[in-house]
Image (tube, rainbow, N blue to C red):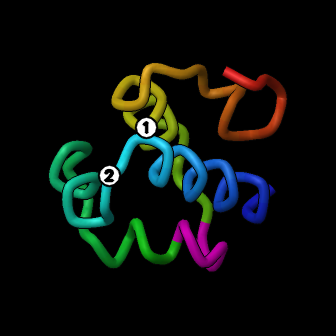
Amino acid sequence: MKDIIAKRLRDIMNEKHVNQVELAKAICVGQSTISSWLSAKKAPRLISLWKLADYFGVSVDFFVGRADF
């Protein structure tokens, strides 16, 4: 699951031209937290998945690999 989330997050960040610092500020987490998600060391908690989904305009299902939007 962590690997899927990491890949989806990396892909959408690249697509939207958002860096780790910008994303961290936007969803109120530390840049090191974003880094740990991108390296699949940790998975975001549900509240963070909601924030990510809202920020990028996708569903939570997108991040867990259940949808392509």
The vertical placement of 3 against 62, above or below, is: below
- Report the amino acid beneath label 2: Val
Front-most of residues 58 and 18: 18
Q: In the rendered image, which residue does mark 1 sit on? A: 52
Label 1 Cα neighbours within 10 Å, binned few <14 / some 14-19 / many ≥20: many
When asked about the image quadrant of residue 52, the answer is top left
Q: What residue type is labelled 1?
A: Leu
Vertical relation: 15 (above or below) 36: above
Q: Which of 19 and 53 is in front in this view?
A: 19
Q: Which corner quadrant holds the C terminus?
A: top right
Q: Which residue is drawn at 42% across and 30% down?
A: 56
Left or right, 63 with respect to 22, comes to: right
Position of 1 with respect to 19 (left or right) is right
- 14 displayed left or right of 1: left
Q: How crowded is mark 2: few (under 14 residues within 10 Å), some or many (20 or more)?
A: some
What's drawn in magenta, residue-wise?
A: 37-42
For marks 2 and 1 on the same chain, the one whose residue lies earlier in the sequence: 2
**Rendered image quadrant of residue 43:** bottom right
Q: Residue at x 60, y 51 (%)?
A: 11
Task: Determine the residue positioned at 49% across, 44% down.
Answer: 15
Cα distance in 3D space between marks 2 and 1: 12 Å
Up/down of 21 relative to 51, above or below: below
User: In the shown orientation, is residue 21 left or right of residue 37?
Assistant: left
Residue at left offset 69%, top offset 58%: 7
Q: Name the residue under label 2.
A: 18
- Residue 40 included in the magenta stretch of the image: yes
- Callout 2: helix, strand or loop? loop
